[in-house]
Amino acid sequence: MYNLPEGYMQPWLHFGVVEFENGVRATGQIGFDEGIESGMELLATVGVVRTRSILYKESIDCQETGFVFVKP
């Protein structure tokens, strides 16, 4: 994915749809760059997908979490 929303400090990211054994599907960030193939087995984790600063009276760093899929 290119043209990421504000707050992502990288030029692109890998994004995928994962189907679990029970048929539930989830979308999320793929946490590695090499060897991505359709149908490969992944481990679903929850991690920080971006950090952004909110400016109001004081600066607050806000971490946003989501699914990050990694190799088992």
Image (cartoon, grey):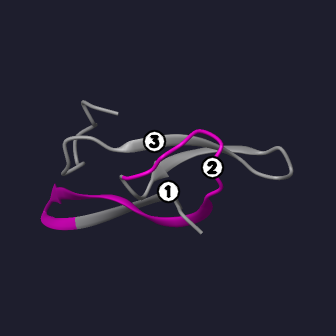
Question: Which numbered disc flags the more N-terminal residue, 3 or 2?
Answer: 3
Instruction: Kindly identify which residue carries mark 3.
Output: 15
Instruction: Give above or below for 45 relative to 34.
Output: below
Instruction: Kindly identify which residue carries mark 2.
Output: 40
Question: Which numbered disc flags the more N-terminal residue, 1 or 2?
Answer: 2
- Mark 3 touches mark 2? (CB < 8 Å): no
Q: Quadrant of the C terminus?
A: bottom right
Verify whether residue 41 appears in magenta.
yes
Verify whether residue 25 appears in magenta.
no
Residue shown at 34%/64% (left/top)?
63
Q: Secondary structure at mark 3?
A: strand
* Camera-nearest label, 3 or 2: 2
Instruction: Give above or below for 12 relative to 32.
Output: above
Three-letter amino acid code at the position of disc 3: Phe
Q: Position of residue 37 (x, y in %)?
A: 53, 43
Which stretch did the figure color magenta? Answer: 34-60
Three-letter amino acid code at the position of disc 2: Met
